Image: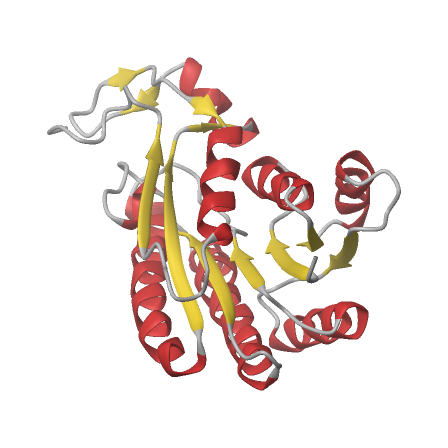
Amino acid sequence: MALKTALVTGAGTGIGKAIARQLVADGFKTALVGRRKEVLEQTASEIDPEGASTLVLAADISKPDAVKAIFKAFVDRWGRLDLLVNNAGLSAPGVPLEDITAEQWLAIVDVNLNGAFYCTQEAFRIMKAQEPQGGRIINNGSISATTPRPQSSPYAATKHAITGLTKASALDGRPFNIAVGQIDIGNASTDMTSKMSQGVLQADGSMATEPTMDVEHVAKAVSYMASLPLEANVLTMTVMATGMPYVGRG
């Protein structure tokens, strides 16, 4: 079987961990990228006890030089890049827009948008140059890429921007056999969504509990997107807890 390789950002916990686990199960040699090396190493030991299919690369993806370094280390290890999953993301405190500090705004933009761009840029460079040419990029857009929650301006703004990055890079990648798509995720059950069982602020100002879904459904959706030949692409996919208050008016 031909070597398949993947790099997943934000891979230490939550959605990224579930995606990395699934990709390893699917036969991908997978790099786990995140800021906390010890968390990445714990995840790697859980999903790949023998250590043959994972590579831990601790880095702050908001720093262009750090991104260049992890992609170089990846190619040095496995020779080519078949799949990039731009999953890393930060959110801001749920406070009124005017109370968000400049530092909080910039931190979220740096990771959610700038980091995704830097990783996409390095992936393009590698995928254009390798033989056979091409590869796939999957961006985590989130439901907030189309419909924000109250008091979420920094997060929603960056996720809307991810949709623009997805579409523009999908267009730019066509001549080079690079397929770019986006998965918008709603209420996957992780530590980040645990508060939903206590109630979440709704658009009408009320508080309501919201249903969640097993994060494994997200991992399986990404697995499907990654399994396609490069002549086919899922440009956008929404995977959400069926009962979450998203489709109707809020």
**Residue 150 % position (x, y):** 26, 36
Q: Is residue 173 above or below residue 113?
A: below
Which of the image's four quarters has the N terminus? bottom right
Which of the 4 quarters of the picture holds residue 83? bottom right
Examine the rendering and report whether any part of residue 240 can be seen. Answer: yes
Which of the 4 quarters of the picture holds residue 172? bottom left
Examine the rendering and report whether any part of residue 152 can be seen. Answer: no
* Residue at horizontal 37 percent and vertical 61 percent from the top: 232
Q: Is residue 90 above or below residue 45?
A: below
**Residue 115 % position (x, y):** 53, 65
* For residue 19, side relative to residue 248 (left or right): right
* Residue at horizontal 53 percent and vertical 56 percent from the top: 85
Q: Nearer the viewer, residue 170 or 3?
A: 3
**Residue 157 % position (x, y):** 31, 56
Q: Nearer the viewer, residue 121 or 37?
A: 121
* For residue 67, side relative to residue 158 (left or right): right
Which of the 4 quarters of the picture holds residue 247? top left
**Residue 94 % position (x, y):** 38, 36
Specify the farthest residue to the bottom: 129
Q: Nearer the viewer, residue 44 or 250?
A: 44
* Residue at horizontal 69 percent and vertical 45 percent from the top: 24
The colour style of the image is secondary structure
* Residue at horizontal 79 percent and vertical 34 percent from the top: 46
Number of numbered markers: 0
Which of the image's four quarters has the C terminus? top left
Specify the farthest residue to the left: 249
Specify the farthest residue to the front: 1
